[in-house]
Amino acid sequence: MVGLNNMRVRIEDVAEAAGVSMKTVSRVLNHEPNVSERTRLAVEAAVEKLQYRPLASARLLAGRRSYLVAMLYDNPSSNYLMEVELGVLDACQSQHYNLMLAPVDYTAKDIVAKVESMIVQSQLDGVVLTPPITDDAKLIARLDEMGIPFASVSAQEQNRRIGAVVDERSAARDVVLHLAGLGHRRIAHIKGHPAHGASRWRLAGYRDGLKQAGLAYDASLVVAGKFFYESGFDATNTLLDLPDPPTAVFAANDDMAAGAICAICERGMAVPRDVSVCGFDDMPIARHIYPSLTTVRQPSREMGRLAGLELLKAIRDSSAGETLELPYALQVRKSTGPAPV
């Protein structure tokens, strides 16, 4: 950062202003432990006052880090990915890290080799894994072998180490109980992509909700989707063609729920008069479509931010970092109503 005197502010200037050594300034900038709160605040105040921004090249030489992490993704829901990405970016910017977005083909046979090559070529300090990559056992094993820190968003229980999760099974149960409370007895479910742990959790929660509401599970009311709009549209048409169609549809994400609403309306039916519809995630589309969508608010951006922060902790200290569970909330809007008489 160039100051009023057209000279770049140096670390020496920050040390002098804070009344500490350059080494102490470096320790504060790198978020190292064993620095008193008083000293840390003094250095941070000096950094802010002088508008000091360390040179990336100098930081790399001093800390042997690239100050670069990557977010790996292969997810059909662009709305979900954008929210998670913004959260990880928030975390990186707060710690003066750079974020690289890395699309990965989850089904590719050479996914492990490609990720390994990317890590080496880009000299990544760590990676954030998003569903369904979060549960790739071979990739996780290779990251461990390489000693590369990683954090996961919505990993299955056996892969949870560092990252952020929501109790999606309980959230899905609450959706079904909401619909049952409105008098619905034939409640359908559009599953998500089979590679995603979220699909299994939400299906399990759907079945939990039926059981708690005293409703029998009917396999004909459960159809496959893939987390994108068109799959929700097609699945809903399959459901509406049943001899005894459902009066409510719970789609495993908002994109598919939006497709469900379109399919229902194209048949001259109305939501929620004829069929109620629920989604999951509470993406912007849930508030922008008509009728507005009843859905589960999953704090995707905050999950990305916290996963990013936990990763940065682990980069600085291999024993640090944990998996954090965030709360969910059922957002009741206009797409759900009493079961038709």
Image: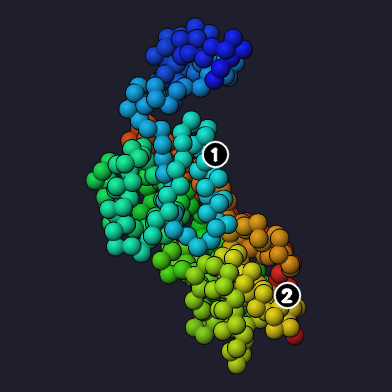
Amino acid on which the number 2 mark rests in the picture:
Pro
Q: Where is residue 248 in the image (x, y as percent from the top left)?
A: 64, 77
Q: Label 1: state its secondary structure.
A: helix
Residue 69 appears in the picture as rendered: yes
Identify the residue at horizontal 62%, vertical 57% (top origin).
283
Identify the residue at horizontal 41%, vertical 33% (top origin).
67
Q: Position of residue 192 (x, y in %)?
A: 49, 69
Residue 272 circle label: 2
Please indicate whether residue 142 sits to the left or right of residue 49 in the image: left
Considering every residue shown, the one lying at the far left of the view is: 145
Identify the residue at horizontal 50%, vertical 9% (top origin).
13
Please state which of residues 313 and 206 is positioned toward the viewer in this rendering. 313
Above or below: residue 174 compared with residue 52: below
Please state which of residues 39 and 181 is positioned toward the viewer in this rendering. 39
Q: Label 2: state its secondary structure.
A: loop
Considering every residue shown, the one lying at the far bottom of the view is: 243
Please indicate whether residue 39 sits to the left or right of residue 291 in the image: left
Q: Where is residue 256 in the image (x, y as percent from the top left)?
A: 58, 69
Please state which of residues 112 and 137 is positioned toward the viewer in this rendering. 112
The image quadrant where one finds the C terminus is bottom right
Q: How far apart are marks 2 and 1 (CA)?
A: 38 Å
Mark 1 nearby-residue class (10 Å; few <14, some 14–19, many ≥20): many
Residue 173 appears in the picture as rendered: no
Could you tell me how many numbered marks the image carries?
A: 2
For disc 1, the marked residue is: 90
Please state which of residues 146 and 187 is positioned toward the viewer in this rendering. 146
Q: Which callout, 2 or 1, points at the residue further toward the start of the chain?
A: 1
The image quadrant where one finds the N terminus is top right
Between label 2 and label 1, give the one nearer the viewer: 1
Mark 2 nearby-residue class (10 Å; few <14, some 14–19, many ≥20): many
Q: Position of residue 70 (x, y in %)?
A: 42, 44
